Image: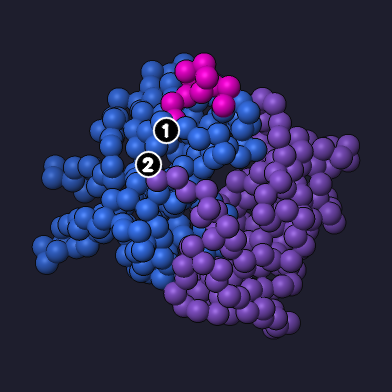
Chain colours: A purple, B blue
Amino acid sequence: MILTGEQIEKSVTNGEIIIEPFDKNQLGPNSYDFKLGDKCLIYKNAELDSAKDNEVIEMPIPADGLLLDPSKIYLINTFETMGSNTFVPIIRGRSSIGRLGIFIDITADLIDLGSINRWTLQLHSVMPVKVYKGMLIGQVTFWAAKGEKVFYNGKYKNHESPVKSFSHKDFKNISQ
Amino acid sequence: MILTGPEIEYSLKWGEITIEPFNKEQINPNSYNFCLLPTILQVTLNENNESTYETIELKEEGYVLMPHILYLAATREIIGTNNYAMTLLGKSSLGRLGLFLNATADLGHFGSVSQWTLELSVVQPLRIYPHMEIGQIAFWTQQGHYKGYQGKYLKDLGPKPSKEDFTNYDSNR
């Protein structure tokens, strides 16, 4: 089951959901609109390797906007610290953002229980388009979970800035 | 409701979910990581505007996926259930590298037990490797009567091209 906006607010009040800072005006009928943070990473090289540590460059988001180049991935944090030990969050772009051809995640919309921090968005645009820090960029929905709960304890835990891919750390696990 | 990791494992033991082969280390708090079958198909259009498929076997040194090309891949695992709805998604580690796992078709065919076909595309060139963990699957409880999936991709093994038949398609209907 998906939570209604009213239930999201109640769960923020009773501590089952963390949204910090929380602004009631950003509640939708069954989601919460979150803002784009202020730190951005891009990869130094055009060609990436999922088994290697790919170097990134930190770039500022200018006050007059960051022009997204369709040939690049931009890792930008959410402004809010969000997460829950009770409900499973799923993120998506706002419809106004989708209408501009902006992806806020690259088929990685499901957040683990216990992953409570500023999330790293994977921005990518179909056409060149400008984004601004602090703009309402995406929405988060919360879903009831069935079964015993274990919490995220992975490689991206507790980060407050955008984090590059640690994909290479998964390669020790491959059994062929 | 979405199943937690322990609930996925529990359902597996009870035979409500099939994941073959299964590795406990690939369980997440609310999903399961699946691996990449080493055979992928590169989709291109021929001069008659028909889709053609070139088979690529991934070797140990990997293979660089290029932007603006669609690749059909498949899960190494045979995955399915008659009890839950399924959604497929990428991993955040690979999303951060610009790898799309599917093209907005993330809802599994409920009732089919198969190696799921994945629609891979990349933003920047990206080297991928055979058998790597490529995506995740989540399981959802359902409401209402169901009869399961009887469609054209029921027991697929390996990546399968679109089987949509447009030969009798009436564009005026």
Residue at 72% x, 73% y is A39
Q: Quadrant of residue A146?
A: top right
Residue A4 placement: quadrant: top right
Q: Is residue A11 above or below residue B141?
A: below
* Mark toward the start of the polypeptide (2 vs 1): 1
Left or right, residue A92 beside residue A18: left
Query: Could you tell me residue B149's position as x and y percent?
Result: 35, 26
Image location of residue B161, percent across then percent down: 25, 47
Q: Residue beneath label 2, please?
A: B76
Judged from the image, the secondary structure of the residue bearing numbered disc 2 is loop
For disc 2, the chain is B
- Whether B10 is among the magenta residues is yes
- The residue lying toward the viewer, choosing from A72 and B96, is B96
Q: Look at the image and give the residue range highlighted in magenta.
A: B9-19
- Compared to residue B165, the image places residue B81 above or below, namely above
Residue located at (14% from left, 64% from top): B46
How many numbered dots are placed on residues in this image? 2
Instruction: Categorize mark 2 by other alpha carbons within 10 Å: few (<14), some (14-19), many (20+).
Output: many
Residue contact at pointers 2 and 1, CB within 8 angstroms: yes
Residue B173 percent location from the top left of the image: 23, 42
Instruction: Tell me, yes or no, if residue A40 can be seen here.
Output: yes
Using the numbered discs, state the Cα–Cα distance from disc 2 to disc 1 in whole angstroms.
8 Å
Q: Is residue A87 visible?
A: no
Query: In the image, is residue B129 part of the stretch drawn in magenta?
Result: no
Query: Residue B58: where, in percent of width, then height?
Result: 31, 57
Mark 1: secondary structure: loop
Q: Nearer the viewer, residue B87 or A148?
A: A148
Q: Look at label 1 and name its amino acid.
A: Pro
Q: Residue at x 41, y 71 (%)?
A: B125
Tell me the residue at 81%/46% (across/down): A18
Residue flagged by tag 2: what amino acid is it? Arg
- What residue sits right under mark 1 in the picture? B21
